[in-house]
Amino acid sequence: MAEWHVTEDLFGRFLSSAVSREEAQRIIRHLVSPCQPCSELASRMTSEVGRSSQQRQAYEAVFARALAFASQQEERLALEKLRGWAQWASLESSPPPARLARVEADERYHTHGFYERLLEASRWYIRTDPNEAVDVIRLAIRVAEHLDTAAIGAEHVADLRAAAWAALGNAERLASSFEAARRAFDEAWRILEEEGTNDPVERAHLIGLESGYTQDMGEFEAAEAALEEALDIYHKLGDTHLHGRTLLKMGDCIGQIDPERGIARILQALPLLAGAKEPRLDLCAQHDLAWFLNDNGQSEEALAILDRARPIYRQFPDSWTQLRLHWLEGRIAVNLGDLSAGESIFGQLWEELRVRDLHHELVLVSIDLAEVLVRKGEPNRAAALVEQCVPILQAWGLHRYALAAWLAFQEALEQGWVLGVFDRMREYYRRHWVKPAVFEPEG
């Protein structure tokens, strides 16, 4: 039987009290289950409907009517979680200090349900505004610190605090605040192991988030190795979906430096994710598979994967997804011998990435474009492009080793020492964008 989800139309009718009791009960029970897409949909729609006191009272009435036929325990838990949407809607437009002041002063915000809604809101923001996600998660941490340990259990509250600190670490690293991210992950581990349950599922979740930080440090092998523990936990639990997601993360980590191993991990993951019905997850899997196939010299296979995935790309019109698509198209075109198409795509990407301040991606696309120009027999243009990037890189405040590596790259192009230089530059900036290290020109 197909998996059931709450649609926009159905939840809209629920908020307007235009559903039957049976429909309302099914919606409630589904929304308080761990279904992230439906919870995010409900959170967004509740925020969009309005933030007035009258509207919040209307939410309360709708939720209460829907829950009137549930057990007392079900009603308490579900109403607390559902109320969190209205509470967040009333705070979202306020600046972070005002949010914190209201939450500190009003114990009605000190609930597990509101904590969960804040983490959901942070996941919504993390794709477009990581700094805002950081502020929301910090508020969730304060809420967790106010939770009733007598009612919930001290160890369980500690687990919630640890999960919030782990989410903070992930948001900080996406906001490029890597030292803050490291401190947050360390605090998450301390709380989980010293105050919490140290539950295997909580450990696996924390490992999964921290692996993103480890990958940003360029420690791809370490990230893959750490994820083995999470993989083993999910395997023992029989959680096929999370087992598949972890394999996908492992493929994304190791594929950056070993495409063949990345491909193998992703191929293991795909059957386990087949029934998940998560388009973004599917897109990540197909995109990474095509990228690593192309890097592994299997460009025709990569193009076939890309063409099959185009309908999924169309579901995500945001600029970052489309830029990643075009980058993949350019790399496949180059490997298939169409250097002119590659030059055109990389040139347009270069401008788009520059105006969006996507620094790391701009450096890697610059390397791709320089390589195309050299292969077209235009080394002087390649050297000029790299020289043009020097003041841009200097303005970013990169560590001195990264700047020195770029100057060495420029010299290599000017002197015609191009054998293997492009692959070495790509690996250097993948491994040492954040973590300083001397560039070794001879590999």
Image (spheres, rainbow, N blue to C red):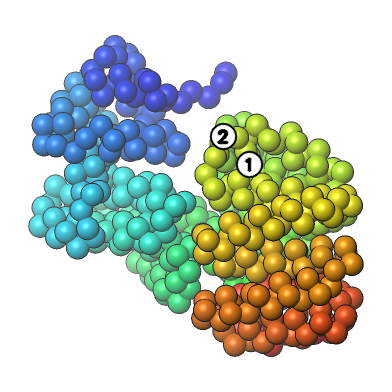
Q: Label 1 sits on what residue type?
A: Leu
In the image, 383 versus 183, the foreground residue is 383
Pointer 2 residue: 315
Res. 413 in view: yes
Q: Label 2 sits on what residue type?
A: Gln
How would you rate the neighbour count of disc 2 (Cα within 10 Å): few for under 14, some for 14-19, many for 20 or more?
few
Q: How many numbered marks are there?
A: 2
Q: Is residue 311 left or right of residue 81?
A: right
In the picture, the disc for residue 95 is none
- Which of the 4 quarters of the picture holds residue 207? bottom right
Tell me the distance, in whole angstroms, between the alpha carbons under discs 1 and 2: 10 Å
Which residue is depicted at the point 77% across and 57% down? 343
Which residue is depicted at the point 89% across and 67% down? 377
- Tell me the quarter of the image containing the N terminus: top right
- Mark with earlier residue (1, 2): 1
Instruction: Estimate the x, y position of residue 262 in percent, counting from the top left.
Output: 75, 55
In the image, 418 versus 180, the foreground residue is 418
Badges 1 and 2: C-beta atoms under 8 Å apart? yes
Instruction: Estimate the x, y position of residue 320 in percent, counting from the top left.
Output: 56, 50
- In the orientation shown, which residue stands out farthest toward the top? 20
Pointer 1 residue: 283
The vertical placement of 21 against 317, above or below, is above
Report helix, strand or loop for mark 2.
loop
The vertical placement of 10 against 217, above or below, is above
Which residue is depicted at the point 70% across and 43% down? 286
Which residue is depicted at the point 75% across and 63% down? 369
The vertical placement of 384 against 323, above or below, is below
Res. 167 in view: no
Q: Nearer the viewer, mark 1 or mark 2?
A: 2
Instruction: Estimate the x, y position of residue 154 in percent, counting from the top left.
Output: 27, 59
- Tell me the quarter of the image containing the C terminus: bottom right
Q: Is residue 58 left or right of residue 308?
A: left
